[in-house]
């Protein structure tokens, strides 16, 4: 199993998908408890949802599951949201705060280090290489980090999550014109709700690579899974009807990022 899949495009846009993979080595899967083996916190069908929306975009996708190691967490293990409930670099609980490992089977420091080397670093090496490649070609690179999550998770946030959660770490990770372009599309009166830098302001990927002063812009999109799944429960079926509707604003967002980026001076 290759830890990362790369589909190269010739535009300035790079789509990152850190949480679509479901592969786990047998030893790690056996260490999980019955709850953990359900892999509940997958970004279900995100690759299918975005497929073909922008054929000239580059896509970098992790093939391993986030329960093995979370590709969108700080490799040093530092929390992105101090004081708030979240999950770790190598999670030992799920998004509901429940243990995912059998008692005494949690990864130790040596195992975390091994997973960093085998999975986390290759994924980010691929992202960095693709960003440098498209930046060299276009003078600018835009990283769009693709995510989804259940719309109601009381352990992580109160109430119901908006349909679109845009993260730019309070405007730090991308040009204001890119942020405004995405927010403008999400705010259109088509029945969707949105928030800018709400509960999710961008994970480690967005914060690490988003350096607009160096010509690399990053923005995270966290979608409520209710917008494209039949139900936010197992077996996590893709709703063609919901997804077809959602793909229209998503395509507009990707096009707006590409077109707006062309207007930014490198």
Image (spheres, helix red, strand yellow):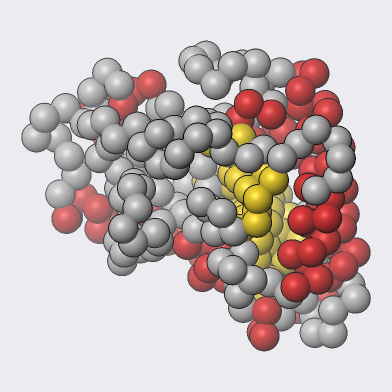
Question: Can you say whether 97 is above or below 194 in the image?
Answer: above
The spot of residue 258 in percent (x, y) is 85, 62
Residue 191 left/right relative to 70:
right
Location of residue 170 (image quadrant): bottom right
For the residue pair 17 and 92, the one nearer the viewer reads as 92
Please say if 163 is above or below 16: above
Percent across and percent down for residue 184 are: 83, 55
Which residue is rendered at x = 90% and y = 64% of the image?
A: 259
Residue pictured at 14% horizontal, 35% vertical: 105
User: Where is residue 200 shown, x and y percent of the image?
Assistant: 53, 53
In the orientation shown, which residue stands out farthest toward the left?
Answer: 104
Q: Is residue 231 visible?
A: yes
Q: How many marks?
A: 0
Quarter-of-image position of residue 44: top right
Tell me residue 77's x, y (percent): 30, 61
Q: Taking the image as drawn, is residue 135 in sight?
A: no
The residue at 51%/42% (across/down) is 19
Out of 4 and 13, give the one closest to the viewer. 13
Which quarter of the rendering shows the C terminus? Answer: bottom right
Q: Is residue 97 or residue 206 the one in the foreground? A: 97
Residue positioned 86% across, 40% down in the render: 189
Judged left or right of residue 256, residue 102 is left
In the depicted structure, whether residue 214 falls above or below residue 188:
below
Q: Quadrant of residue 142?
A: bottom right
């Amino acid at each position: 199993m290759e830890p990362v899949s790369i589909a190269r495009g010739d535009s300035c846009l790079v789509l990152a998908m850190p949480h679509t993979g479901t592969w786990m080595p047998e030893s790690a899967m056996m260490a999980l408890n019955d709850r953990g083996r359900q892999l509940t916190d997958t970004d279900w069908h995100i690759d299918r949802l975005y497929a073909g929306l922008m054929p000239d975009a580059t896509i970098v996708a992790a093939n391993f599951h986030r329960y093995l190691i979370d590709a969108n967490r700080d490799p040093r293990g530092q929390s992105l949201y101090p004081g708030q409930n979240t999950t770790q670099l190598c999670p030992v609980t799920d998004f509901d705060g429940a243990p995912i490992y059998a008692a005494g089977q949690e990864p130790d420091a040596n195992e975390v280090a091994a997973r960093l080397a085998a999975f986390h670093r290759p994924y980010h090496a691929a992202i960095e290489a693709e960003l440098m490649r498209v930046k060299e070609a276009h003078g600018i690179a835009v990283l769009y980090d693709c995510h989804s999550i259940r719309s109601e998770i009381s352990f992580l946030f109160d109430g119901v999550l908006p349909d679109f959660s845009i993260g730019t770490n309070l405007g730090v990770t991308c040009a204001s014109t890119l942020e405004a372009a995405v927010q403008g599309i999400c705010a259109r009166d088509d029945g969707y709700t949105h928030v800018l830098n709400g509960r999710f302001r961008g994970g480690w990927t967005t914060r690490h690579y988003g350096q607009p002063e160096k010509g690399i812009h990053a923005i995270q999109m966290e979608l409520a899974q209710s917008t494209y799944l039949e139900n936010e429960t197992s077996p996590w079926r893709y709703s063609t009807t919901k997804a077809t509707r959602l793909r229209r604003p998503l395509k507009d967002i990707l096009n707006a990022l590409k077109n707006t980026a062309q207007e930014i001076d490198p």
